Amino acid sequence: MLQILYLAQDLADPAVRRRTLTLLAGGAHVTLAGFRRGGNPLAAVSGVEPIELGTTADGRFAQRLGAVAAACLSLKSRLGHLRKPDLIIARNLEMLAVAKRAVTLFGGDVPIVYECLDIHRLMLRRDMVGRALRAAEARLGRDARSLITSSPAFIEHYFRPLSGLEAPPMLLENKVLEIDGSTLPAAVPAPYPQPGAPWRIGWFGALRCRKSLHLLAEFSRRMEGRFEVVLRGRPAYSELRDFDGFVQNEPFIRFDGAYRNPEDLAEIYGAVHFTWAIDFFEEGQNSNWLLPNRLYEGCRHRRVPIAMKGTETARFLAVRGIGLVLDDANPDALAALLGSMTPDQFSEAADRIGRCHPATWVFDRSDCETLVRRLATLTHDATQTIIPAAALAEARHNESGLL
């Protein structure tokens, strides 16, 4: 059994929980260690007791650097009792630093996989700060056996031209984890609103985009109750300090709290018609390149995604001939896109999603097993072939999610 030490930047991150479940379903034994950034009991994984390396704060980069330094100094006391892992997966740059220290602790010959599913705006700066961070990433990731990322655009726009990393990429899209599909409900079209009832837009996951919140608020007010917005997930209070008060004062927006992923997806998507697959948080950079979780989750349940023109998400939808694309980020454009929606139009849009192969949206147990086997090869294959730039075009159409 492959022994994996998974180092996570935020133990309460639902994506960390999902990756841990993926590795377990693939047949690996997982030891989870990392920083506590906030409370989220729904992120706990049954049978896995995480090892806390310290506490960090969202949006406080200097504090996180200090916490990483302290964790590296105390790593022997935290991890010294563990069995030597076959592989270390380091999620995000700060955990890559911890992973390097852990390799020394375990004897110097444990391979590292670098997992990076978002490109922080600091990494893209063209000044001394950005150059220093990219140099640190290249140095820390110099011996990484593989790079896990979630969008071809991250490879094309950052990892290939800017990062300095040479680790071969492994594309793992943010698909819905369905370990046992036989127990999950079939995806069914959303029922049309009854006369007088609203259409509902679901914005689920990491709620961090102020521009989206204000756009949806103004649009829903303009529609005078014909559209409602349902929010679920974890608000980023470092970016939306007034989130609770703002939502409370909006007549057509409601926040229904956190949820478990994947266990609660059928329920929360069953309550909406459209998926808000737009993020302006790092507009022109990470937000343009990502393929968000809610894109796959909503389409898995045949809810119609709304993407922003010019983004990787919009390109993804255009290739498959599905979804709706917003031309401009203003209420008028959103009203033009959705305001005249009819049941027939919605049914046609949902049916187009239903005609896509399920593997477009779902990562099942066999995929988990394939991933773990792929990771296992890294433990005994020190000579990895760097994937050339020409292979990126092929990656953009890789439906299996594994490059």
Image: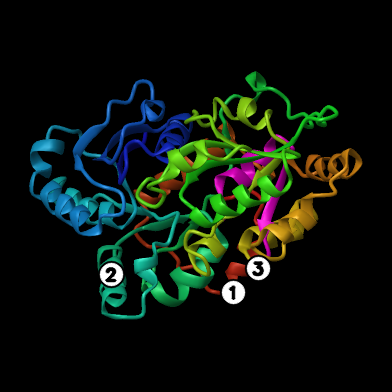
Rendered view: 95 above or below 261: below
Number of on-image labels: 3
Residue 328 lies in quadrant: bottom right
- With 370 as the anchor, is 48 left or right in this view? left
Rendered view: 198 above or below 144: above
> Which element type, helix, strand or loop, lies under badge 2?
helix
Closest to the camera, between mark 3 and mark 2, is 3
Identify the residue under disc 3: 310
Q: Marks 3 and 2, how far apart in space?
A: 28 Å
**Upstream in sequence: badge 3 or badge 2:** 2
Closest to the camera, between mark 1 and mark 2, is 2
Q: Marks 1 and 3, how far apart in space?
A: 22 Å
245 or 15: nearer the eye? Answer: 245
Query: Residue at the spot x=60%, y=54% of the render?
Result: 215
Task: Say whether residue 301 is magenta.
Answer: yes
The amino acid sitting under disc 3 is Gly
Residue 392 image point, x, y percent: 58, 68
- With 346 as the anchor, is 122 left or right in this view? left
Q: Residues within 10 Å of mark 3 (few under 14, many from 20)?
A: some
Mark 1 touches mark 3? (CB < 8 Å): no
The amino acid sitting under disc 2 is Leu
- With 316 as the anchor, is 376 left or right in this view? left
| Span of residues in magenta | 291-310
Rendered image: mark on residue 390: 1
**Upstream in sequence: badge 1 or badge 3:** 3
The amino acid sitting under disc 1 is Ala
Identify the residue under disc 2: 133
